Image (tube, rainbow, N blue to C red):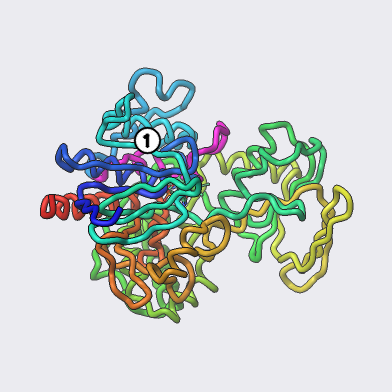
Amino acid sequence: MRGTVLNAGSILIVGGGASGAILAAHLLRFGDARLRVTILERRSVVGAGIAYSTDEPDHLLNTRASGMSAWPDDPDHFWRWLQADDRGAGVDCRDPFCFVPRRVYRAYLSDVLAPFLSADGTGRLRIVEGECVDLAQMRGGVAVELADGRTELAGVVVLATGHAEPEATDATGIVGPWEDSRAAPLPADAPVAILGTGLSMVDNVARLRRTGHHGPITALSRRGLLPLVHARASTPFRLDAADIPFGTSVAYLTRWLRGAARWHGGNGGDWRDLMDAVRPHTQAIWQSMSIDSRARFLRHARTFWEIHRHRMAPQAAEGIAQSLSDGQLRVLAGRVVDKRQEGDTIHLALRLRGGEASALAVRRVIDCTGILRDPLSGRNHLMARLVEAGEARLDPLRIGIETDAFGALVDRRGAASRRLLAVGPVTRALFWEVTAIPDIRLQCAALARRLIQEAGRTG
Ligand SMILES: Cc1cc2nc3c(=O)[nH]c(=O)nc-3n(C[C@H](O)[C@H](O)[C@H](O)COP(=O)(O)OP(=O)(O)OC[C@H]3O[C@@H](n4cnc5c(N)ncnc54)[C@H](O)[C@@H]3O)c2cc1C
């Protein structure tokens, strides 16, 4: 490998979830014919990742079709794709404001990439199935080491490794939010506990009910708050940067948001319009906060932010309302203070909000406590390796790795890399809201422009 010189026109993306797929599409559409892209993905499918791997018909996008196009300058692209032939067969989507099953989005991303692939593997896009375990920068490029001993070479590597997935089912009978269907079968009348009351809880309740589960389901989170619901239609308005109180305390920002929502409501508007209007400024608001303020936000305000910002599709909300009213689902505010397994039963000791002690005996516990995890936790061994080698460093709040504004990894000494970059939720330490497609596609477009420019200079 010594002496190999690769130019920036050979780009390898680690992770073929939505971020990796959208970045590849931008690079290949706008880069010249010499630009080559490899996606290295440990799953057998590209464009799926955590969010779009599900085949459940009731697991819906929580973003309208109009927000899911891969191209920020063509927001109806996904919706038009849905209308063509029978792609949207069986899907009720009469306008770009509908919410469709997430599996449909996986098919869309696969179609977006299709023009760049060729059956004999000689297209501008290569897909390699495997797990990246290490990256070594060398003169002229990066050596990408795979778990099975293979090595790939690239001029530039972009990490699109997404969320820190929890380790597979542990011995205590607690399963992760996306693996319950793979766990041992559950008797249909068995009691189930779900830790967390956010969107993954909503998914799990929908799946349990669709598959005929009729045992009681208890969902528990610190505050017992459920995600709020999208309006059937939205009436967006624009907020000017001058209207936003950048750099203020979390308490002030919260008061300002409440006041603005009241004012907008008083003028016949809906608070959701305000949340959508704040969205283009969210990253700048986050960046204007001190580390202390960000920590305070994560501790005290994040749950409130998330239930307003990451909302349920109306159909999903109807399912939850039905399961609450027929009594199968109950939602508690509190926390688990102890757990013990006895045969098939898991005993949970709870401390409810207000101090009361309570107990639950269930056959399964599904951990839906969220996707905001320490980047070194769970299955993400590559990140641990990069941090250990000093090629990356964690941000002080341990919600992601440090990057510069374009996604270049910042190393142990504080220098931004020219060859190692990142995109999507891995970069949330700097951007906070870079979780959903409307933000990810903008970030992919900007990074692709920069990488194409760079390739033009070195090619
Ligand atoms: C359940 C769920 C539902 C969501 N629904 C929506 C929605 O409706 N609308 C919306 O806009 N957003 C939604 N989101 C937000 C979601 O974060 C983004 O839409 C997007 O899917 C993020 O994609 P990603 O590729 O960055 O991450 P991920 O989906 O986590 O994908 C990362 C990929 O990298 C691979 N990978 C990781 N490490 C390695 C390695 N070392 N080697 C090889 N491969 C590796 C993983 O296998 C995975 O496929 C949802 C998120 C979740 C969790």
Taking the image as shown, residue 386 lies to the left or right of residue 185, namely left
Q: Which residue corresponds to mark 1?
A: 109
392 and 114: which one is in front?
392
Residue farthest front in this picture: 2
> Crowdedness of circle 1 by 10 Å Cα count: few (<14), some, many (20+)?
many
Q: Position of residue 218 (x, y in %)?
A: 74, 52
- Asked if residue 356 is among those painted magenta in the image, a careful observer would answer no
Q: Is residue 360 left or right of residue 320?
A: right
Identity of the residue furthest to the top in this view: 85
Write down the quadrant of residue 37 in the picture. top left
Evaluate whether residue 204 shows in this view: yes
| In the image, farthest residue toward the left | 457
- Which residue is drawn at the image coordinates 47% and 70% (left, top)? 388
From the viewer's side, name the closer residue of 181 and 391: 391
| Residue at position x 47%, y 26% in the image | 91
User: Which residue is at 68% across, 50% downward?
Assistant: 169
**Residue 63 part of the magenta-drawn span:** yes
Residue 7 percent coordinates (x, y): 19, 51
* Residue 101 percent coordinates (x, y): 49, 34
Image coords of residue 155 (percent x, y): 25, 53
**Magenta stretch, residue numbers:** 50-72
Identify the main secondary structure in magenta: loop
The disc labelled 1 sits on which kind of residue? Leu
Q: Is residue 188 left or right of residue 317?
A: right
Judge whether 227 appears above or below 286 on screen.
Answer: above
Q: Secondary structure at mark 1?
A: helix
